[in-house]
Image: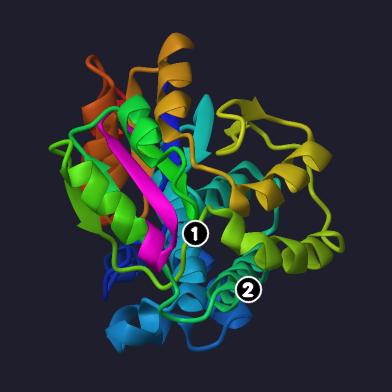
Amino acid sequence: MYAALFPGQGSQRLGMGQALYGASSAAREVLDRAEAALPGLLRLMWEGPEEALTLTENQQPALLAVGYAAYRAFLEAGGKEPLLAAGHSLGEWTAHVAAGTLALEEALRLVRLRGRYMQEAVPPGEGAMAAILKLSREEVEEAVKGLKGVEIANLNAPEQTVISGKKEAVERAAEALKAKRARVVLLPVSAPFHSSLMESARERLAEDLAQVAFRKPRFPVYSNVTARPEEDPERIRGLLLAQITSPVRWVEILWDMEKRGIRRFLEFGSGEVLKGLVARTLNEAEALSVADPESLRKALEVAHA
């Protein structure tokens, strides 16, 4: 029994998915379908330039394609479907593709639009995000209370919270938090994600989502907004929209999974960010990544143990 996790922005790297493409017919099928839907995507993922890959509208479909390809490779090699699934921000979309809520091609088109709308919601240089380490959520909330233009964006781990908003406000909040002995890391992002400044992106994406059919997922997928597993297709549609301007409640998602008996987690896609967050949040949990043939082999050994 395990939970499937799918990463969000920041996990991309040049060459991601290429080894799985060569080793797994299922991964190859997924990535070929992604290339047919968005021509040029595979070359961008494998050859760059890296600056283009990191653009929000390119990064989001690339990470979705690689995450789903890794998941399908795992199933092809004998792995079973998860009891539950969750994705961090963009990764929630990948989780829904894995669960059958959305078709791959539809999801790729939608997350490219999502990324474009998010990028265009705030002029370059006007927004910022910062990770706050070594302070609890409550301490961060107390420190930013009353500061206009800054909001809690990600609750990643018990002592890792991300703030988002207008650049000047985030910088003021960062100084206030440093005075409380927090470690503050300004994030290299192009917009203030998961804040009210993304409202125009939410409104634009609503029109596109209204035209897409959602199906009941084969297994429950957690919403970043509610931190609960969701199965109703229309509710999922609304929550994916709300997610754009709402905090990612990752800590609560992991805690809820633990309460339901989950002790094993597999992160499908590029990088090991979520594997690290599991280690920082849960004391008695095992987390592995599935990103290439070697990590796939190790995940299968654990899954069948």
Residue appearing at x 49%, y 30% in the figure: 82
User: Mark 2 and 1 residues: CB-CB less than 8 Å, in contact?
Assistant: no
Quarter of the image for the N terminus: give it.
Answer: top left
* Local secondary structure at mark 2: helix
State left or right for residue 177 relative to residue 30. Answer: left
State left or right for residue 167 relative to residue 41. Answer: left
Q: Amino acid at mark 2?
A: Tyr
* Mark 1, other Cα within 10 Å: few <14 / some 14–19 / many ≥20: many
Residue appearing at x 76%, y 47% in the figure: 237
Q: Above or below — where is 183 with respect to 29?
A: above
Q: Amino acid at mark 1?
A: Phe
Which of the two residues, 259 or 265, is positioned nearer the viewer here?
A: 259
Q: How many numbered dots are placed on residues in this image? A: 2
Checking the image for residue 193, the label placed there is 1
State left or right for residue 41 relative to residue 268. Answer: right
The magenta stretch is 157-169
Give the prevailing secondary structure in the magenta stretch. Answer: strand
Q: Position of residue 31 (x, y in %)?
A: 48, 70
Which of the two residues, 146 or 270, is positioned nearer the viewer here?
A: 146
Residue 214 seen anywhere in this rendered image of the structure: yes
Residue 168 colored in magenta in the image: yes
Q: Which residue is mark 2?
A: 117
The way the protein has been coloured in the rendering is rainbow
Residue appearing at x 55%, y 73% in the figure: 34
Q: Position of residue 244 (x, y in %)?
A: 60, 54
